Image (tube, grey):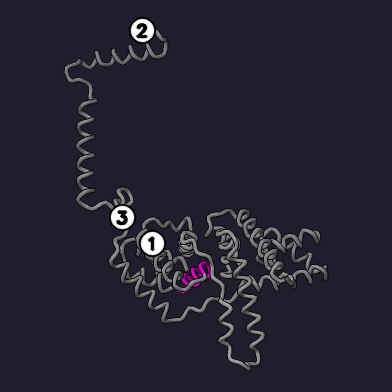
Amino acid sequence: MTGTEDSDDALMARVAGGDADAFDRLAARHMRRAVALAQRLTGNPSDADDIAQEAFLRVWRHAARWDGARAAFGTWLYRIIVNLAIDRGRRPGWSPLDDAEAIPDGAPDALDRIAERQTAAQVNRALDALPDRQRAAVVLFHQDGLSQRQAADVLGLGESAFASLLARARAALKTALSAGREPS
Amino acid sequence: MIESQFLRHLADFGADPTRWPPELRAEAERALAVSPRLRAARREAEAFDRLLSGAAPQIDEARVARLLSRVAQTARATPQDTLMVLLLGRTPRWTAAALCVALVTLGWLAGNQLAAPASLPRGQAVALLSDDVTTLFDGDSR
């Protein structure tokens, strides 16, 4: 999208000059993904809303610091969100198993849905137990679909360091999930 | 790429070789094409990746609109960082101005104090400096 007057770069240049309308357009373009990422990182919609708002206010306040030659706007925004989520010190909550009780009795797929929720809860607990940056690596790469290069940029790492972080996270998750499936 | 290498990369990066580091992709595809065992391992890895990817959070339009409205309102009431703000932080304007005046005055006074005495002829000042340099490097003044 770079190169047009509606590109992120062009809008950011206007935001840096104090153009609030350009800021509105940029926020409208990226807000949904920003909230989704924050929610995946914190596991909590309320925290996600706070983080997304604070991230965009930082974009507004520090627009003059952004350098399009060093990072794409999306990468910069994601970096702010990841840092805010880590700073907040929260972990993703897991879908409470109580939710499964809300499924109407007799629903033909009720048991499957309960099993799915339990599996999701187990995965969330395993993610919850990871160190912050390992969890961020899994969220960015597996859940948000960023490439290794993009995710490495967001976390301020080289590509090989990111690959190593992701490998450690996956190994830890595999161990945790395998242990969780063993009969007690 | 031998099987053990492929399996290690599969564990590290997941089931989709197109998302592996670029230098590994072509060899990974070749290894997959010839090995039924690797294809089976890949199917298992796909199931694990599906677990990790989870369901996308539901973000409805009303929530996004509410956030956009709040952010737009707050941004309009929030000053942006300018070069002066970056240099001086969020110091109040009058304090920053007073600080600037004080720094300029201090610089002017310091400049006056350090200037060579006006009464000394120019040639003499140069000679004194030359003596000091000789002392420094020879350890003995002329």
**Which residue is most to the bottom?**
A106
Q: Tell which subunit mark 1 falls on.
A: A
User: What chain does badge 3 belong to?
Assistant: B
Q: Which of B91 and B20 is in front in this view?
A: B91
The amino acid type found where label 3 is placed reads Thr
* Residue displayed at 42% across by 64% down: A9
Mark 2 sits on what residue? B141
Element carrying mark 2 = loop
Image coordinates of residue A134 in percent, x first then y, are 59, 60
3 or 2: tag closer to the N-terminus: 3
Residue B81 relative to residue B138: left or right: left
Task: Check disc 3 and report its element: helix, strand or loop.
Answer: loop
Inspect the magenta stretch and tell me whether residue A179 lies in it.
Answer: no
Q: Mark 3: give few (<14), some (14-19) or many (20+) Cα within 10 Å.
A: some
Using the image, name the chain to which the residue with label 2 belongs. B
Q: A56 or A50, which lies in front?
A: A50
Q: How crowded is mark 1: few (under 14 residues within 10 Å), some or many (20 or more)?
A: some
